[in-house]
Image: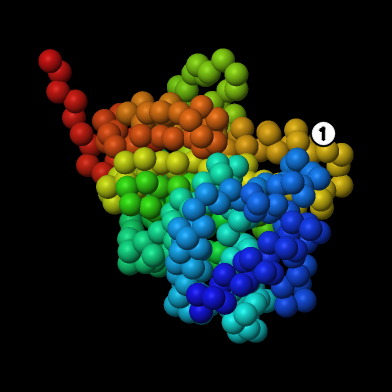
Amino acid sequence: MEQEILDAFYHKIIPQASSSGKVVIDGFVFNSSFCLSSQVEDIRDDRMPVIQIRDKDRFDKALVQYTESMLQFLEQNKELQKCDYLYFEGNKEAIIEAAVMNVWFNATEEDFREPIRFLEYRNHFLTDITCNLECDNFHKGEDIDGKVPHHYEWSIGVWNPSGNETPYVFRSRMVMDDGSSLNLPNIGFGLDGDKAYVYAVHQGKVKEEPSNGKKKLNRILYQINRGVVDDYPDESVLDVSVSSIAALTVFLSFLQETACNEMIVKSNFPIRTLAKMNNSRVDQAEFVRICENTINKFYRDFRRLSYHFPELEITSYPYEVDNSMHIDISSTPSLGDDYIHQVYHSFHEPVEIKKK
């Protein structure tokens, strides 16, 4: 299988992607412009990402390990075969080709410069024992009293790794005593030791008019804005989705329970961006503006989270050290009397701060 994987990458995927910007797998066309560093002289588009391989033996080993883990992941989660035409047909050659290509859709500029490290932590996402054991387990927090008593629940599920950024998704929701519930945004993430990589905070489309129960829960969420004072000079931390902040708070409690010490927030994926731009009906300048607004809004959610929990230290912003936001989450939030602390402490016992 090792040779099949390397042949798929070097002799099928790379030549097509670097020459035409399109890759054909089993009759299906994918937009994917990237090439190897050895082919840089052939690049005519300076926007094209370049995979910079400095140690071919290590790179090949990492690529094989990642792809084998992906194949095993798909075998263990057969329901994914219903999500994607490539996997549904059971064509092993096509599955391998898709695996060695699709991973680059989730690479940032930094990842293209450090592809070995990228493949290694993507492999760790797939093989992480915590996510594997927690998959489909439901966790319930303590009741939060008030005019409308309710609690939060969370679970980890498998995401289709062909169409989404990560193999696992963190799902959470609010639940009232009468059973009414409100789903919070999904969080696409992967674990690599004590580091949690976060790729997306995504709210699905609402297809129907919300029930009275959902409306009550939505109103409760707006308590998160109570007393918040914007202290950022560039963009308002009030300009966020309160449901996203609630979801991230529950997610934070899970990460700290699993002894994660750092959150690495990823965004700006060149291959995805190029594909979206090619399919966009707006001009390039407008497309760039939309992308920048979307990315800024994504990072603003995490600035808002650190606003509520100052124990979370944003150690670097994108392009200060690399192209990700890094957040130290090793310190447990202290006791607070606002609503968002109640959400957090419904899963964690409050820690009293002793006065000197």
Residue 295 % position (x, y): 62, 37
Residue at image x 82%, y 33%?
Answer: 285
Residue 264 % position (x, y): 45, 41
Residue at image x 87%, y 47%?
Answer: 281
Residue at image x 23%, y 37%?
Answer: 350
Q: Is residue 154 left or right of residue 4?
A: left
Residue 328 % position (x, y): 36, 34
Q: Is residue 192 left or right of residue 291?
A: left
Residue wearing tag 1: 285
Question: Quick one: 175 or 287, which is closer to the camera?
Answer: 287
Kind of residue indicated by mark 1: Ala
Q: Where is residue 93, by image quadrant?
A: bottom right
What's the image's color scheme? rainbow
Residue that extends furthest to the bottom in the rendered view of this protein? 90
Question: Quick one: 241 or 297, which is closer to the camera?
Answer: 297
Question: Quick one: 81 or 1, which is closer to the camera?
Answer: 1
Q: Is residue 20 visible?
A: yes
Q: Is residue 132 left or right of residue 60?
A: left
Q: Dot 1: what SS?
A: helix
Q: Quadrant of the C terminus?
A: top left
Q: Is residue 221 left or right of residue 15?
A: left
